[in-house]
Image: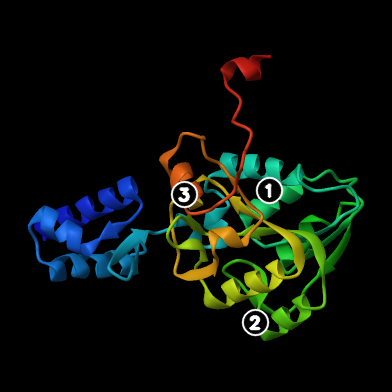
Amino acid sequence: MVLAAARKGVLLERLRRDGRLVVKDVAVELGLSEDSIRRDLRELDAAGLAVRVYGGALPASPAVADYSVRQEVARESKARVADAAVALIEPGSTVLLDGGTTTLAMVHALPRAFAGTIITHSPTIAAALLDHDAEVIVIGGRVFKHSAVACGAAAVEAAQRVSADVFFLGVTGVHGEAGLTTGDAEEAAMKRALAERAAETFVLASEEKLGAASRFGILPLTGVSGIIADLDRGDPRAGALRRAGARLLPVPPAPGPLDIAR
């Protein structure tokens, strides 16, 4: 059991370091059978610590936790991404807002006097907009409680009747190999339906989603207008995403001690 735990620790470290793991290569490197590595990866996948893919695994996103838990994850990073996203909204425009904790941070950053239209399939986002001047349109359907959004056939059909200038897409994973992912198949389908209804789509990528992956694909990295990524330009993950074709939009850095003092 100790040996198995040690092996899994090595595998998780490789995933954190490299952003992916190839069974064949790791088996040779560690002098173990490929079956042993696959078995370890199955157990890590079941524990939510890795996402198995053909030939290996990718780092699992922590952003698939329940909504209440996610509210406490990477709060400062989400606020930075939200500020950068709000700066992209034109006065009087029609905005599609996905559900999730980063889009909720966007609502908090959005000036209450914004006089455009906001369309959302999240009752949580709609309720947070009650004190804003914007007109709010809610897309209905079966509520997926994990993310507090409407999903399913009725929601997708309703989405096909709206159009917007810009869609802010929430994801749980942004990975150079897996693309843009989330943890539920119907939620992924709903996100694709919304992206089709906007002239531009921007991804909200706070730090815990970068370099990670979830089970279900939404869109490729090249299928959106840009990714608002809380990444330093020199971060290796930024290079990997750019090489995969992603357009990364800058996020203002957190203020340092001297900035706060001023």
> Based on the displayed image, in which of its 4 quarters is residue 191 positioned?
bottom right
- In the picture, the quarter occupied by the N terminus is bottom left
Q: Is residue 6 left or right of residue 20?
A: left
Give how far apart the Cα atoms at labels 3 and 1 are. Answer: 29 Å
Q: Is residue 49 visible?
A: no
The label nearer to you, 3 versus 2, is: 3
Q: Amino acid at mark 3?
A: Arg
Q: Position of residue 30 (x, y in %)?
A: 11, 54
Residue annotated with mark 2: 152
User: In this view of the protein, which residue sits in the foreground, 132 or 241?
Assistant: 241
Q: Position of residue 257 (x, y in %)?
A: 57, 18
The residue at the point 64 percent across, 71 percent down is 192
Residue annotated with mark 1: 105
Q: Is residue 70 left or right of residue 8?
A: right
Most distant residue in the left direction? 31
Give how far apart the Cα atoms at labels 3 and 2 are. Answer: 34 Å
Residue annotated with mark 3: 243
Which label's residue is closer to the chain start, 2 or 1? Answer: 1
- In the picture, the quarter occupied by the C terminus is top right
Q: Position of residue 3 (x, y in %)?
A: 10, 57
Element at badge 2?
loop
